[in-house]
Amino acid sequence: MSQQGETDRRQEDEWWRQLYGQPEPGGREPGDTLDDRYSSALTALGEEADGGGTVPAQAAPQDTAPPAAPGDGRYTGAHPARAPGGRFGAGPDEDDAGPPDTLRLRRPAPSPATAPRPWQYQGPPHPQAAPRPASEPPGLPPGWAPAEPAPESPPSEAPPGPPAPAAPAVGSAPTVLPQPTPTEVAYVGDGPPTYDPEPTAWPAADPAGLDDLVPDTELDGARYGLLTVRTASVRGDSARYRGEPRRDAVLTARFGGGDDALLLIAVATGPRTSDTAHRAARDACTWMATAVGRSQARLSEDIRASRRGSLKSGLHRLTDRCYGRLRARGEDLGLDPADYSATLRCLLLPADPDCRIRLFFGVGDGGLYRIRGGEWQDLDPWRPDEHAETEDSPAVRFRFRASVARSGDTLLLCSGGLAGPLRGEPALAALLTQRWGAAGPPGLPAFLGDTQTRVKGYADDRTAVAVWDA
């Protein structure tokens, strides 16, 4: 080997002459057959060849192993026959033949069919041949034995999981859960309403005032101590058809924590003829909640001490301030006071389970009802002379009521859009008494469905707040 890593040229030429260029004395010129190349290769490696250029036949090794028993995992088929020209015939286990100029060494001739394949695992010696199975598995070629079964996996050390459910008995019918009884009522009264029950059109949007957009429906709920609260506000059928915004607004808020917390639910409705009714209703709820939140400590103290006079005067003062801000906001927008106003009705509930006082206060039309012992009670009867509107306020009378709840009571506060059909259609009040009375508080979807029970001739927005006392 030279310094550059190349083989000496003279040695390389001498090797090739010995391999192909110098036949043995008395022999013939090497041909281009596989036998000739094999003989030449043996000569170059120092093996002796016979005078005809063929390799002496080697004695086949004696097979001392016992005949393979069928089914012991070893190949038992016959060896492929040797093809003319010194090559083995093609078979499933035979190597592919290479190009004509490829040097391939001849394998020793195999012994009879019992000789195992060199790549086949023989396994431990068997003292006694296994009995042949009655029948071989379908799909195997003739002479092929089935594969050895896979060894069993060691047991897992992981903790056992829960037991699998028992399989049903063969032939038994599957268990079918009973379907819930439908409880939805499309409408009550003499006939179906005129409008479609689902939303049809959205209100037109202003790119510069997207904060004014109001969703079609609002749904909320909570539970504190003995209280369960559900609220829903839905756009009326008429507004859904005409693409008008919902004029009702609802706000739920908790001020404080623990037993000192106060729950406020405010419901407001803007004037029907105003394009800014939804803004005024939202502002009324927001500003009322701001005032109550800032006075939370004093209000909680007065409620626990049952100071009815202080509560009425204090909440009346907070309500007046809220309407004063509404008037100022309307003037800033260049609107008449009546166009930027709203009716406002609120519930103030202590979270303390030992205090069952429930406060209602507000201004304007709406409803306040109670279900006690399966009986529907109107706690704020509507009188037309008390709802005369003036240029400064939608109503001149401040409304306040403090009541003591009992276990099983349901208190309902609603806007005028729901109070109207409750007064005009007794079937609606009877339905809600059945749904919201002794049955207890429903889930949010069921509560929304009950609130949307329609009555012909009433298509305004609806907002309902229900409180269950355990």
Image (cartoon, rainbow, N blue to C red):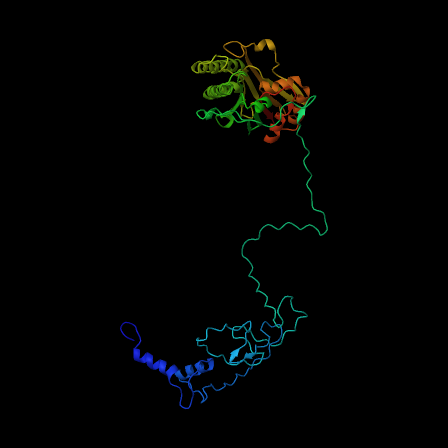
In the image, is residue 67 above or below residue 429? below
Q: In the rendered view, does 185 fall on the left or right side of 41? A: right
Comparing 120 with 370, the one in front is 120
Is residue 443 among what the camera can see?
A: no
Comparing 198 with 429, the one in front is 198
Q: Quadrant of residue 408?
A: top right
Q: Position of residue 6 (x, y in %)?
A: 30, 73
In the image, is residue 267 above or below residue 179? above
As drawn, the residue found furthest toward the bottom would be: 26
Residue at position x 57%, y 53% from top? 160
The quadrant of the rendering that contains the C terminus is top right
Residue at position x 46%, y 75% from top? 100
Q: Position of residue 373 (x, y in %)?
A: 67, 23
Comparing 81 with 58, the one in front is 81
Is residue 385 among what the camera can see?
A: yes
Comparing 438 with 43, the one in front is 43
Q: In the rendered view, does 332 fall on the left or right side of 185? A: left
Q: Quadrant of residue 449?
A: top right
Residue at position x 49%, y 27% from top? 257
As drawn, the residue found furthest toward the left would be: 3
Q: In the rendered view, does 16 fall on the left or right side of 244? A: left
Q: Quadrant of residue 116?
A: bottom right
Q: Position of residue 88 (x, y in %)?
A: 53, 77
The quadrant of the rendering that contains the N terminus is bottom left
Q: Position of residue 448 (x, y in %)?
A: 60, 28
Task: Tally the marks.
Answer: 0
In the image, is residue 338 above or below residue 375? above
